[in-house]
Image (cartoon, helix red, strand yellow):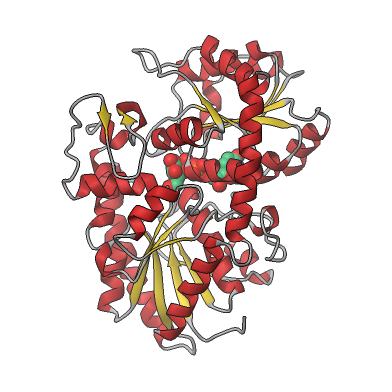
Amino acid sequence: MERSDAHILVFPYPVTGHVNPMLQFSKRLASMGLRVTLVTTQPNTKPIEEAQSNNYPIHIEPISDGFQPGEKAQSVEAYLEKFQKVASQSLAQLVEKLARSERPIKFIVYDSVMPWALDTAEELGLDGAPFYTQSCAVSAIYYHVSQGMMKIPIEGKTASFPSMPLLGINDLPSFISDMDSYPSLLRLVLGRFSNFRKAKCLLINTFDMLEAEVVKWMGSQWPVKTIGPTIPSMYLDRRLEDDKDYGLSPLNLNVDACITWLDARDTGSVVYVSFGSLASLGEEQMEELAWGLKRSNDYFLWVVRELEEQKLPSKFIEDTADKGLVVRWCPQLDVLAHKAVGCFMTHCGWNSTLEALSLGVPMLVMPQWTDQMTNAKFVADVWGVGVRVKAPDEKGIVKREEIEECIREAMEGERGKEMKRNAERWKELAKEAVTEGGSSDKNIEEFVKEILCS
Ligand SMILES: O=c1ccn([C@@H]2O[C@H](COP(=O)(O)OP(=O)(O)O[C@H]3O[C@H](CO)[C@@H](O)[C@H](O)[C@H]3O)[C@@H](O)[C@H]2O)c(=O)[nH]1
């Protein structure tokens, strides 16, 4: 497509699980001729200048979130309040600055958890569309709760939503099943539906075949566009040259160490373990997980973020050095694409879930909080690509024996083989969705045309 003058701003909430998919979506838009500027307040990413100088397909604009590097807010509420106040002002200033340039902003794609960005856009005379970084099912659940169509706390043991299987309490997003756990985050996710009817459309990081019924239901109510999975192109359709990774990942990736280690393992012999960029396991749970991995006697590659390291049992790394590699962060896509990986033990963050589905990797799911419970339900019972650990005991702990058994089931049993077959099928369908003429590809084309014509 010819490069156009249309310039759009993409503004993710500043955490990895939100920046990654919105950055990938930005690259798709840029490949279709739009000029795209991604707004970031995230300090711990590859130096911005590096991204700018390497013929990077999009522009990056840092703005302030009101905090100095390293400064911590006193609470989630305090962070969100200051972030909204400062970032909305910074956003308006940026749009006004660009209005005086050759390429003024025409449209804003904002993270759905920041509905105030649409108000700012409106004040500046711009249209906008929210980007949902979670599944369509999860968004539909929050919608029902936000509109009072599903009362919380939920009474009884199950909850029923249109176009979805019956959900048990443990399948609901944790902010809903345990309303008092994070009241400010519950407000944040429900707030996504405060002004969305004023948006041009709703962009959702999923694909039609994956959530066919709920996508259809949502599409019958609002202008929904499924645009996922937002995985770097080299792993799916291979149409975007050089699009091999998310680009703005943290420094010090152990790329070579992880891949060299995997190269030395047999096909399907390694359990890859990661709980994403935010989840923090308790010390006891960490210990159970460590011993569960050891007891399985399988090879494992385990991402333990720096702040979590002190929770590992003492001498665990030395004692398991012949079987395991523990790293602080890894190139997850390269790891999932590696033939040595037999299953992915995951917290079921939506990006990790989509990445495993897109790369055909069966999962062992151990959801921790937020949307992960609902994703786990779909992974295990709807898409048939995962084993879910039994609900934690009364202390909230999943025991080592349970972990060991689930690893065996995923790596060795008949169930594991069936999961692998299903995962291969989802991999093909994910690829189809983003390949030319696929459902997500068509939706992105349509979105671009609508912007150009507006
Ligand atoms: O060693 C690692 C570990 C993770 N990742 C990447 O980090 C991202 C992690 O995203 P996700 O799996 O979604 O987990 P979180 O970081 O926990 O994401 C938050 O945001 C998601 C999207 O809203 C939610 O679904 C999650 O529940 C929420 O915790 C993925 O792209 C991974 O590929 C790496 O590259 N290397």
Query: What is the x, y in percent for residue 297?
Result: 70, 14
Q: Return the residue nearer the eye: 417 or 10.
A: 417
Based on the displayed image, in which of its 4 quarters is residue 304 positioned?
A: top right
Residue depicted at 52% across the width and 38% down the height: 276
Q: Is residue 287 above or below residue 373?
A: above
Quarter of the picture containing the C terminus is: bottom left
Q: How many marks?
A: 0
Quarter of the picture containing the N terminus is: bottom right
Q: Return the residue nearer the eye: 35 or 31.
A: 31
Q: Is residue 7 above or below residue 384?
A: below
Classify residue 447 as left or right of residue 240.
left
Residue depicted at 67% across the width and 19% down the height: 317
Query: What is the x, y in percent for residue 288?
Result: 52, 14
Q: Return the residue nearer the eye: 413 or 344.
A: 413
Query: What is the x, y in percent for residue 408?
Result: 63, 16
- Residue reaching furthest to the right: 264
- Residue 71 appears in the rendering: no
Q: Return the residue nearer the eye: 321 or 441.
A: 441
Query: What is the x, y in percent for residue 323?
Result: 73, 19
- Residue 148 appears in the rendering: yes
